[in-house]
């Protein structure tokens, strides 16, 4: 989507209305924010049949009864699909995600956990949103951010990492809570990403922050190197003053990195995401689930996926979920397991 208008007053360079999917800048390739009010789950951890009948199941992005099914046909979410040539950072602030992949890993994460998937080469997983609670509603709030990989990292073996919410660092001040998903802020650093990540090298200046501000709160994010691409996503709340100008929520702001980002929240609690990073500055070709170096590379990868996606999937179904009552965990293909301390 093109940017809607341009601001002539620095440091705000451009402004855009936000929808379900967010436009991004190099090194980021794509982001999305899923916010749904799912009802209490049935025995299959799914919505009641009366609320999903009549939908375009398999590709349901229309919000009915307060929620979408996405590509799920029983449980909402995203059945088996491929990634190749980039990484994803997935943050369910509310709700669970059940995860199975082509490496043999599986788990359930949610409620502030962070998952890094670096898919330098072909990788498949499913991400389902189980309605785990049968006695109450199952609201979810899931943000997914995709970061490109440079050519020297494309073709590397996939890596998966879960950072539990208790291990995700945050900086709290009067009326503000800043969750540090990548990079640093206020003298604190995020948990390290996968080693195959553009964010793993501090010189790439990747910073991902989730910012919660109470009504009337103020916050300043210091300037970054001038070559950094900096974008602020104002996703919920009322009006807020950003770099001296007032904006409403559902707004993306491209901001000059070499100036301080000043924020003064309005009369409602608000949530923002800040995505920053030095660009990779390489020519890549993207189509569907693939970002590689050229057209032939992408065509060859698409053919490889078509020929091998089911034979390389080690699970019995493509929309697999964890059993009802499962707590958060990750179990790797070698049998090792990790669970949060909280």
Image (tube, rainbow, N blue to C red):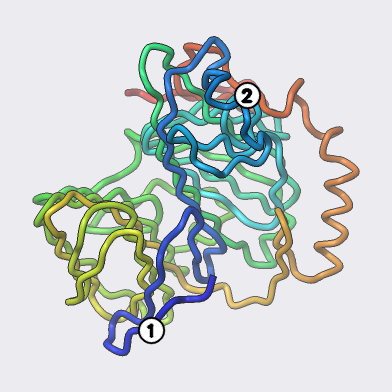
Residue projecting furthest to the bottom: 8
Quarter of the picture holding the C terminus: top left
Quadrant in which the N terminus is drawn: bottom right
Rendering coords of residue 191 (x, y %): 39, 46
Whether residue 81 sits left or right of residue 260 in the image: it is right
SS type, badge 2: loop
Q: Which residue is mark 1?
A: 6
Is 212 displayed left or right of 161 in the figure? left
Residue 143 badge: none
Q: Position of residue 292 (x, y in %)?
A: 73, 64
State which tag comes first along the sequence, 1 or 2: 1
C-alpha gap between disc 1 and disc 2: 43 Å
Q: Relative to 43, is 225 above or below?
A: below
Query: Pointer 1: residues within 10 angstroms few (<14), some, or many (20+)?
Result: few
Tell me the residue at 27%/53% (across/down). 211
Position above or below: 209 against 296: above
Q: Which residue is mark 2?
A: 74
Left or right: residue 109 versus residue 292 is left
Q: Is residue 121 left or right of residue 222?
A: right
Please say if the residues under marks 1 and 2 sit with CB atoms less than 8 Å apart: no
């Amino acid at each position: 989507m093109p940017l809607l208008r341009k601001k002539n007053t620095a440091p705000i360079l451009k402004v855009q209305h936000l929808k379900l999917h967010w436009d991004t800048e190099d090194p980021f390739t794509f982001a999305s924010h899923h916010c749904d009010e799912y009802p209490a789950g049935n025995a299959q951890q799914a919505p009641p049949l009366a609320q999903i009948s009549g939908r375009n199941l398999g590709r349901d992005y229309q919000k009915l009864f307060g929620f979408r099914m996405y590509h799920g046909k029983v449980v909402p979410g995203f059945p088996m699909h491929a990634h190749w040539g980039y990484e994803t950072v997935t943050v369910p602030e509310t709700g669970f995600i059940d995860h199975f992949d082509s490496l043999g890993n599986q788990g359930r994460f949610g409620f502030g956990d962070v998952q890094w998937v670096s898919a330098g080469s072909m990788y498949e997983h499913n991400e389902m949103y189980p309605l785990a609670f049968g006695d109450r509603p199952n609201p979810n709030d899931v943000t997914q951010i995709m970061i490109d990989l440079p050519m020297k990292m494309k073709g590397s073996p996939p890596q998966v990492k879960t950072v539990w919410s208790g291990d995700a660092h945050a900086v709290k001040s009067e009326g503000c809570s800043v969750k540090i998903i990548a990079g640093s802020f206020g003298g604190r650093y995020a948990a390290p990403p996968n080693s195959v990540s553009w964010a793993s090298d501090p010189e790439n200046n990747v910073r991902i922050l989730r910012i919660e501000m109470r009504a009337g709160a103020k916050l300043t994010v210091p300037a970054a190197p001038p070559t950094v691409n900096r974008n602020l996503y104002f996703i919920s709340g009322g009006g807020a003053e950003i770099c001296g100008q007032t904006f409403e929520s559902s707004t993306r702001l491209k901001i000059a990195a070499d100036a301080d980002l000043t924020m003064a929240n309005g009369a409602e609690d608000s949530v923002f995401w800040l995505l920053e990073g030095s660009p990779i500055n390489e020519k890549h070709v993207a189509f569907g689930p693939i970002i590689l170096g050229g057209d032939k590379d992408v065509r060859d990868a698409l053919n490889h996926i078509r020929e091998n996606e089911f034979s390389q999937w080690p699970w019995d179904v493509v929309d697999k979920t964890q059993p009802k009552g499962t707590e958060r965990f990750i179990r790797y293909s070698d049998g090792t397991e990790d669970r949060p301390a909280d």
